[in-house]
Amino acid sequence: MKRILTALQPSGILHIGNLFGAIEPMVKLQADENPTSPSGLRGASENLLFIVDYHAITVPQDPAELRHNILFATATYLAVGIDPDKTILFQQSRVNEHTELAWILNCLVHMGELERMTQYKDKARGKGEAVSVGLFDYPVLMAADILLYDTNVVPVGEDQKQHVELARDLAERFNSHFGETFVVPQPQIRKEGARIMGLDDPEKKMSKSASSEKNFISLMDDEASVLKKIKSAVTDSGSTITFDKTRAGLANLLTIYSLVTGKPIDQIVTEYAGKGYGDFKIDLAGIVSTYLAPIQEKINDYLKDETKLLAILDQGAARAKTIAAKKMELVRQKIGVKL
Ligand code: TYM
């Protein structure tokens, strides 16, 4: 059975880029029923989705806020349709095999490979020598996350592709040093939505850490903020609604429109023939708010019942641990530390 895995950082409220780039593909995967999964989960593939709290601490975190963000992320996944009976939903730090395997992979990875990582270069820029070793080593922990579960497919946004490629290289390197141990994973990048761009700067991806709130639409934005952000979204000096990658701002808004409504972009373009940016933006804001409202209601409901959230995470950690512990036993044996 195919194993599919992805993870997100609990760094504050998620935005629609995270939703469409990573979570929604996991929700869709749950659709195919197959009651024969070895873990007892229902679904045609075995799916894992987790909250990478140890990745989040590679930049300073307020402990109380981090705790809240972990619960918030759990509530969000459930609200958008992750079913804990079909997807193993858990918190990374609860399965200590992740950090154990990361250490072993650290001894195989080369400094040069990590120095080439685009995300590290972006995040370290301007920090000089004060950049944390954790930030540098982040892709190795991510490789451990993936390899521990013999993952076949990793649905991620475009920005994480390089990290999944490192996981592939490390799997191959380990296998050639110590014999066949890890499955070599494939990144899966969806065609549309793999890279939702910033509303205030359509040349860069939408990001939680952007300097302006106008960059992203958070899943918790109310109607007024969605309208304000979409109205002020950067577009070009044209006036017609057409899909053209060189008109990056408009192309991004059309992509969001298509993802939210499920309509193909061509159809949206036809519907807006003869209309201008103003009408389009107002309609889009309405569509996005209508889409988010029930999700927000569900997130708030889940957050009211912390005991339930903790129970779901407990169950997920126990399931993940069963797979991870077995793999680590094999890894210890392969490298010669198991006596
Ligand atoms: P993170 O938390 O930065 O982002 C979570 C997921 O959301 C995707 N994403 C986007 N997709 C489309 N448009 C955007 N603007 C956008 N911004 C973010 C990301 O590509 C990602 O899929 N290192 C990872 C988390 C991680 C992981 C893993 C992922 C840790 N271990 C193992 C997969 C497998 C990260 O920081 O993602």
Image (cartoon, rainbow, N blue to C red):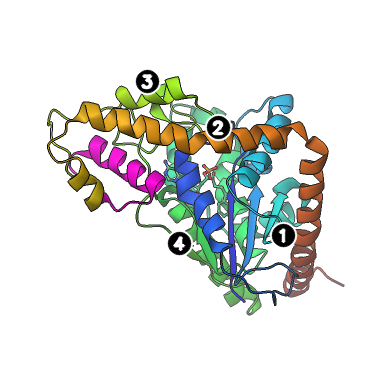
- Res 325 → quadrant: bottom right
- Residue pictured at 56% horizontal, 37% vertical: 294
Image quarter where the C terminus lies is: bottom right
Mark-to-mark CA distance, 2 and 3: 36 Å
Per the image, the residue denoted by label 4 is 188
Amino acid on which disc 2 is placed: Val
Indicate whether 257 appears above or below 303: below
Extent of the magenta region: 243-265
Image quarter where the N terminus lies is: bottom right
Mark carried by residue 228 = 3
Mark carried by residue 85 = 1
Indicate yes or no whether the magenta region holds residue 101: no
Mark carried by residue 131 = 2
User: Magenta region's main secondary structure?
Assistant: helix
Amino acid on which disc 4 is placed: Gln
Q: State the SS at label 4.
A: strand
Indicate whether 69 appears above or below 179: above
- Residue pictured at 63% horizontal, 37% vertical: 298
Mark-to-mark CA distance, 4 and 2: 30 Å
Q: State the SS at label 1.
A: loop
Q: Earlier in the sequence, mark 2 or mark 1?
A: 1
Viewer-nearest of labels 3 and 4?
3
Indicate whether 115 appears above or below 291: below
Q: State the SS at label 2.
A: loop
- Res 235 → quadrant: top left
